[in-house]
Amino acid sequence: MVCFNTGPTLLTSQHSRNMFKGKTAVVTGASSGIGRAIALHFACEGASLLVTGRNEDRLADVASECAGQGAAEVVQVIADLSNTDDVGKLGKTAMETFSKIDILVNNAGSAVVCTFQETEVEEFERVFNVNARAPFLLCQAMLPALEKAEGCIVNVSSLAASQIFPKGLAYGMSKAALNHFTEALAFECSKKGVRVNGVSPGTVKTRQLAGEGGENKLSQQEVDATVNFMAACQPLGTLSGLISADDVAKAVVFLASPSANCITGHTIVIDAGHHPYHAI
Ligand SMILES: NC(=O)c1ccc[n+]([C@@H]2O[C@H](COP(=O)([O-])OP(=O)(O)OC[C@H]3O[C@@H](n4cnc5c(N)ncnc54)[C@H](OP(=O)(O)O)[C@@H]3O)[C@@H](O)[C@H]2O)c1
């Protein structure tokens, strides 16, 4: 069986450079995986954070890890991003919490692992609501505060937006919509000084992949087969061939940093050299 113990992100206070001291960051899907790693990186760099997810215990654990890593402030918001009211409340809370928002990371994501014919409309809608509609609405709600800060947005997409994965049709469509959103919003926001970029990871070792997110219908055998196949496809991957959440977080930090101040409308692919035929 493939082990999914993602372990603690390797950060220590000696890495802290306070790059985001005085900055505010909102991270969705911060209660686990890639979102947790992103929140920890910003915390390590002294940011004030609003972290959000659905699972209270896991979010509280991440919030306390962030405080321990040096975050100036950590606010937790429980919200289900498939729900319009919750999305509205999250946007409002973020605007009330921070007078300006420097960074919004739309990381929360939901998958459905189904063939085209098996995909039920409720699943299709849930995936689109979380992966495409929630980022749209959250950006709309927070744009005034992002403009005030001349801030930036980073959307967490997926390689599935541009490559075909078995049983990944609806998920890939939702992430392709997100990529289009990144480009189109960057165009609209560039005159206002707000940058919009994305990251597009290959296969990362997280709960979503392990089928622990509650919505992934793969059996353990299917999970293991997928992971082994994907690991063989990603020749540069670490951690048993897979990309780590930390690898993705570092790219997000770069896009949010002053080093990327002339980059907008792009989605960086982080795929460890993914090639679908490496495994054959
Ligand atoms: N793992 C991969 O191989 C991979 C590859 C490419 C892209 N991605 C993308 O990376 C992002 C993070 O995923 P991950 O791999 O880190 O998976 P993960 O560990 O399962 O984390 C997913 C996060 O999204 C949140 N989330 C899911 N559904 C939500 C909903 N309806 N409302 C609010 N929050 C919700 C979860 O919150 P709770 O746990 O609190 O419910 C959790 O914090 C997603 O956008 C995913 O599509 C992942």
Image: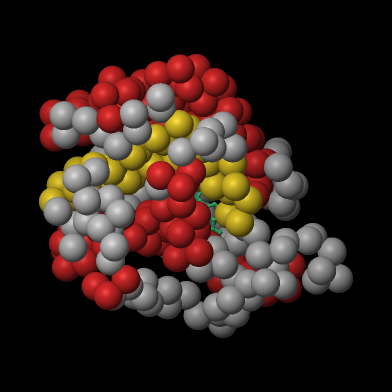
Expressed as whole percent of the image width and height from the top left, the position of residue 51 reads: 25, 48
Q: Quadrant of the N terminus?
A: bottom right
Q: Is residue 35 left or right of residue 234?
A: left
Q: Is residue 262 left or right of residue 226?
A: left
Q: Give the answer, above or below, for where 19 lies relative to 171.
A: below
Q: Nearer the viewer, residue 238 or 82?
A: 238
Q: Nearer the viewer, residue 19 or 229?
A: 19
Residue drawn at the location 67% of the way across and 72% of the way down = 236
Q: Quadrant of residue 154?
A: top left
Q: Quadrant of residue 180?
A: top right
Residue drawn at the location 28% of the way across and 66% of the way down = 16
Expressed as whole percent of the image width and height from the top left, the position of residue 227 reads: 63, 70
Q: Is residue 99 left or right of residue 32?
A: left
Q: Give the answer, above or below, for where 229 lies relative to 186.
A: below
Q: Is residue 233 visible?
A: yes
Q: Give the answer, above or below, for where 88 lies relative to 268.
A: above
Q: Quadrant of residue 39?
A: bottom left
Residue drawn at the location 72% of the way across and 61% of the way down = 274
Expressed as whole percent of the image width and height from the top left, the position of residue 69 reads: 21, 67
Q: Is residue 254 left or right of residue 158?
A: left
Q: Tally the marks.
A: 0
Q: Is residue 112 visible?
A: no
Q: Nearer the viewer, residue 232 or 55?
A: 232
Q: Quadrant of the C terminus?
A: bottom right
Expressed as whole percent of the image width and height from the top left, the position of residue 199 reads: 54, 47
